[in-house]
Amino acid sequence: MKTLDVAKFIFASLVVVFLLGPLIAILPLSFTDSVFLNYPIPAYSTRWFRELIETESWRLSIVNSVIIGSGTTVLATVLGTLAGLGLRERRSSLLFSSVRTLFLLPMVVPAVVLGVGMQLMFARYELVNTYLGVIIAHTVVAVPFVLVNVSSALQGVDARLEHAAASLGASPRTVLFSVTLPIALPGIVSGALFAFATSLDEVVLTLFVAGPNQRTLARQMFATIRENISPAIVAAAAVFIVGTIVLALAMTAIRHRMS
């Protein structure tokens, strides 16, 4: 039995190394002083991180990512939470299954298909090349992540607590805001973090619906790779990696603190 446990540990370690290997390999290159991406690194410098801040195109893309990501997080969290609450009590019905599937479709539909459809629809309502259009597009793919997290959190809500509050004279609104939502708050927060991370990483939909003034960091990286491979791309990738790790740690800490 111990031999089997050791074998499982070795296999799991190899899988982790396989998944994290590219990230570990690219992070040191973000501190190179050279204009070429190669090993060994001739000298270490933060020049490429300074370029992200000092160059207008990179700086604008970072600001746009924060603006669009924040808007997406708020909108997706509200819609995903409302959807989770609305679908909570109807798990056995065919209508529930159909509506839930519709909410989850953006997770499986190719982004190119979504992008083409959104571009055609947004052009009709003059939402192409606008911040609102990009936020709506990112929200479409972020809502499923919020819904999954909120639904999982709502499963842990003991209905007897809600019934007890109602029997003591609490109105449905009071029960919702004083009992249900506080218990489900870890799932809501996790969904919000997933929504922000999804918006930060989305590039295909941004290519279809965003204009030059709405260029996000992911789109800027994509455009730079097509034009010229610069170590600034690696520095931006390092920002993505560190930001994702921070979000994951924050999510874990919030879940642990609220549990």
Image (cartoon, helix red, strand yellow):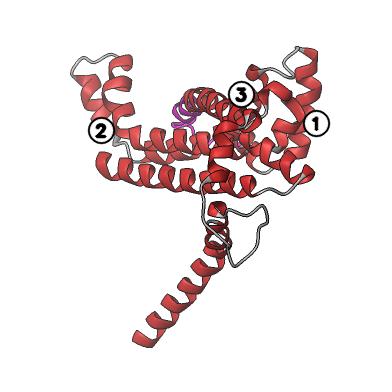
Q: What is the CA distance from the residue labelled 1 to the residue labelled 2? A: 47 Å
Q: What is the CA distance from the residue labelled 1 to the residue labelled 3? A: 16 Å
**Where residue 116 is drawn, which disc sits there?**
1
First in sequence, mark 3 or 2: give its number. 3
Residue at x 51% of width, y 47% of height? 46
Q: Secondary structure at mark 2?
A: helix
- Left or right: residue 255 versus residue 146 is left
Judge by depth and name the residue closer to the eye, 102 or 92: 102
**Magenta segment, which residues?**
80-97
Query: In the rendered image of this protein, does residue 48 appear above or below residue 189?
Result: below
**Where residue 30 is drawn, which disc sits there?**
none
Residue at x 32% of width, y 36% of height? 157
- Left or right: residue 251 versus residue 106 is left
First in sequence, mark 1 or 3: give its number. 1
For label 3, the residue is 135
Q: Position of residue 149 (x, y in %)?
A: 45, 39
Residue type at the position of mark 2: Arg
Image quarter in which the C terminus is found: top left
Q: Closer to the observer: label 1 or label 2?
A: 1
The verdict on residue 84 being magenta is: yes
For label 2, the residue is 160
Query: In the rendered image of this protein, does residue 122 appear above or below residue 226?
Result: above
